[in-house]
Amino acid sequence: MSRRRTRWMRRRLHRHGVRGEPLTLLVDDHYPGETLEALLRGIYRYRSELAPLVLGATTGLIAALLHAWVPNWAPIVAVLAVAGSAALWWMERLTSGLRKVERTYAVAVIGAAGLWLAVGTALGPGTGMLPALLVFGTFAGAVPWWWHRRRRARVRVERTLEAWPDVAEAVGLNGSRVMSAVVDLWGWRARIGLRRGQTATDVIAKVSALESGLGTRPGAVRIEPDPARADHCLIRVLDTDPHARAIAWPATVLDATPRTITAPIPLGLFEDASPVTVTLAHRHALVGGVAGAGKSGVLNAILACLSGCPDVVLWGIDLKGGMELRPWAPCLDRLATTPTQAAELLADAVAILNTRAARLAAAGQRLWQPSPAEPALVVVIDEYAELSDDAPAAVGHADSTARRGRAVAVTLLVATQRPTQKAMGSGAVRSQMDVRLCLRVRERRDVDLVLGQGMLAAGWHAHTLDAPGKFLLSTPEHTTPRRARAYLLNDTDVTTLATRHARTRPALDDASRAATDNTIRDAGQQLVVPRPRQGTETLRKPNLAEGTDPDTALLAALEQAPPGGASISDLMAATGMRRTWVYHRLHHHFADGRAVQVSRGRWRASQPQL
């Protein structure tokens, strides 16, 4: 259209109150063949939708040529059609990427087209009802092709990836390219090659921009590093959330799992339907997340497997009156529901690990191998923050267990809402957790509290999890952020499993059981040698030579202690040592019969000096 005519149309539209540019419907080629080129581009763009029509037209054309040149080839064409259909049906290797219904469709189309081609070759494609059959068959085969979800998804992905250069430029990933793409049940995934100097971390920082550029729903894009190349990354786009609904506990999961704590135990499913498994032998575990995020559900999934293992003894601490762990009571060797009971239980755990460490040292070994005769010990603590608030004496025992318990198979399984230093009591407990499972957290900074410093920047976005039971798992085997959802056990499942597994629960080995019998009680716990307090006399400072070792000073202080006993503070002043060292030596002297506990926090020699 000429400029003069365009101006004339603009004046006419303006006169009638129409603003803007006129809609031009005329064809104006800027160079010869522009219209044809646009038509060919449109055909190429919609080549998938036009495939059935192209197949029908091609079949009719081939039939016309064969009828004109070699009409006697009709039997050969029929045999080839039948043989090709049979081969496609039986040779599954050629159709490994097709489901059975898709393979049936392909066989039916090839067989019908081949038979029509044979008849058309013999009689001519325009004879009788053959043209009508060709048109009807083409549209009959096109309807399921047009309607097929996977084909439409594949076409949509191809068109999206064709626009990748523009998307990459818009989000700041210039120079990146799509290397491969695959459509799966929930969406599609692609391998992206990045330009020099870029890594998956740069792509993770642009997840929100990618969701906008690709036109997806919020939270649909996942980024993972390529384990083979630092300059590649994997992008996964979910059209629908595979974890929108809870995943019921499968009754057969324990049948396929080895009954031992040394084997990985199943927790749930990743977004690609692969199982989530984690090994808990010789490892402490931390489960973190806000209230209502599904911590109890994760603990149920773990206990469902551990309670069926004959080489692990389970102890539990639940300061909410046993509300969470009491359903598993038939499988728990001990369950503490008060601060005093919790302190006693953890003190016994420390005594067991000390005994096992001594046995390993005497045998020249470094790792306790769990077995039904000598099982591992797992202490499950629900809401650890309550423990640090209500039973501060137990925190020191938990700290000792976290630092020294892994080698001797005395481990902690801790659940808490927000594992701050105040809630955990010290940095040792949290830092020793090899297995970290993070459910939904309220604030972005809480991701680093649960999973470790720097994990939020590395793409572990637990604050975006939107349903109970969804979690991110960080272990030595799981080093990339992959969303998962835990199995859900209802009350009936828990009762059934607890009743079934209670009959096969192991007992502690004799040495470990003896260690708990000899544990010294302190800080408000039941005394091993209960005696009434007979006074509050102060300790006379022993008269010792310069350079006397602390253990000798401790024994001298115990011998000179008044009948009511010496306090821990007095013993620390007499020896110049820390509280933990004093308690350790008191345990040793108590076991040898050289010291007794008179009352809460007060000690003297078993045979005091006269």
Image: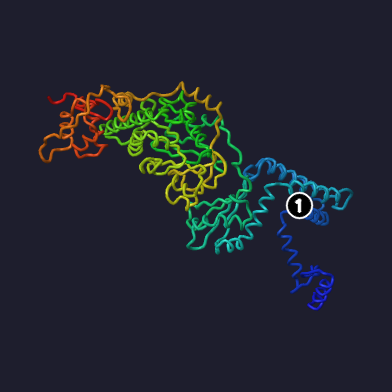
Residue 22 in percent (x, y) is at 79, 69
SS assignment at label 1: helix
Which residue is farthest right? 128
Q: Quadrant of the C terminus?
A: top left
> Who is closer to the viewer here, 195 or 53?
195
Which residue is farthest left? 545
Which residue, given by chain and number where applicable, does mark 1 sit on?
A: 52
Tell me the residue at 39%/40% (across/down).
424
Tell me the residue at 50%/23% (across/down).
500
Where residue 249 sits, quadrant-wise, is top right
Where residue 159 sits, quadrant-wise, is bottom right
Residue 304 in percent (x, y) is at 49, 30
Q: Quadrant of the N terminus?
A: bottom right
Q: Is residue 287 above or below residue 192?
A: above
> Who is closer to the viewer here, 16 or 295?
16
Q: How many marks?
A: 1
> Going by the image, does 313 lie left or right of 497?
left
Residue 600 in percent (x, y) is at 28, 28
> Who is closer to the viewer here, 535 or 355?
535
Q: Is residue 132 above or below residue 576?
A: below
Residue 170 visible in this rendered orientation of the protein: yes
Residue 495 in percent (x, y) is at 52, 25
Q: At label 1, which amino acid type do we have?
A: Pro
Query: Within 10 Å of the Cα at label 1, are there few (<14), some (14-19), or many (20+) other Cα atoms?
Result: many
Tell me the residue at 13%/38% (across/down).
548
Which residue is farthest front? 536
